[in-house]
Structure formats: structure tokens, C-alpha cells
Amino acid sequence: MTVRLRLQRHGAKKNPFFRVVAADQRSPRDGAFIEMLGTYNPVPDPPEIRLDSQRVDYWLDVGAQPSHTVRSLIRKMKRGEPVIDLAEEGADAAARAAKAAARKKAREEARKKAAEEAAAKAKEAEEEEAEEAEEADDDAEKAEAADGDAEKAEEAEEAEEAEEAEEADEAEEADEAEEAEEEAEEADDDAEKAEEAEEADDDAEDKDDEE
């Protein structure tokens, strides 16, 4: 009987999990096996490999042939890469504890990151609110300044209209005074002419009396 060291697939669809087994090469891939030597989980990063180095060496010594993937896993273990050696007492428990600690640390980091993001969003919202309030104040000041300018322009326009009206009244009064002066001069001229005519009549009468 030829023994093969190969993977036996378990787990859900798109979430595979493998057992490393020693099995008769004539057995179906996921069928009966002689001994389970460990597990291989390719989902985590890095993948999780658990092998019993003593039993793997035993089967290799008796001529068992590893599949390509199992041979790669054994090489990783021989090179000292992160592989849990089930032959070492407490190694599996230590690995589980380390994994649990890593998950706990990841959860804490996730909570911390979420809190920091929430604080950053709150600060950003507060800054936006302050900026909007500042812009509103600026707009109010501009509107107030515009109202002041409009009021000043209106006052200037009213003052100009009043000045023009006053100038018009003064011009009208000057025209009336000039007309009155002309009428007075004409009246003086008429009176002078009348006086001259009267004097001429008197002279004429005196001359007649002399004759």
C-alpha cells in the first residue's frame, strides 16, 4: 500500500479549510484516511499552517509521498516559517491564545480608528459650522454696509435736489427782481418823459402869452 500525504478539503464555498492527512493513494480525496497530521487554512494572511512534525517525519521515513502542496507546507516548517508544530507541548494552545490576542487587538484598533474618525468628522462639522457662521456675519456686514451706502446716496441725492431747488428759487427771485427793476426804470422813464412833455407844454404856453 502506497501512502500519500495530501490535503482533504473541508469548509464552506469560497471559505476552504484543509486537513493534512496520511491516506491510501487509492482512497478518494475526501474519503477515509489513516491519520490526520495537521490542518491548513489559506484564508488568513498569512495562511495558518498546523503540522505535527514528528508524525510527518515518521511517514516520510516509511516512504509516504507528499503531494505538491503538502511538500510546500513541510518545506515552510523546515525553514522555520510561521508553522504551528503540534508535536511541541502547548504550541497549539499558545498559537490559539496569540490568535485570540491578535483578534482582540484588531478589534481595539478598529474601535479606536472608528472613534478617531467620528471625532474628526465632528471637528470637521464644527469647523464648517463656524465657517458658515463667519460667512453669514460677513454677508450681514456687507448688507449693512450696502444699506448704509444706499442711505448715504439717497441723502446726497436729496441734498442735491434741495440745492437745485434752492438755486432755482434764487434764480426765479433774481429774475423777478430784475423784471421789477426794469419795470421801475420804465416807470421812471415814462415819468421823465411826461415831465418833459409837461415842461414843453408850459414853454409853449409861455411863448404864446408873450406873443
Image (cartoon, grey):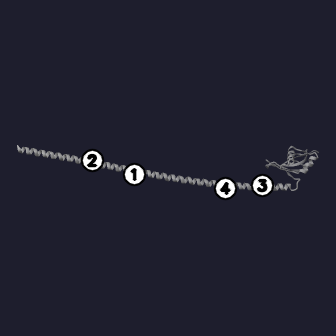
* Amino acid type of the residue tagged 2 in the rendering: Glu
Distance CA(mark 2)–CA(mark 3) = 110 Å
Going 51% across and 53% down the picture, which residue do you hit?
A: 141
Question: How crowded is the residue under tag 4: few (<14 C-alpha within 10 Å), some, or many (20+)?
Answer: few
- Label 1 sits on a secondary structure element that is helix
Which element is circle 3 on? helix
Q: Which mark is residue 159?
A: 1
Residue at which label 2 appears: 178
- Name the residue tied to disc 3: 103
As helix, strand or loop, the secondary structure at mark 4 comes to helix
* Mark 4 → mark 3, Cα distance in angstroms: 24 Å
- Residue 119: which disc? 4
Closer to us: 111 or 197: 197
Quadrant, the C terminus? top left
* Residue lying at 32% horizontally and 50% vertically, measured from the top left: 170
Q: Amino acid at mark 4?
A: Ala
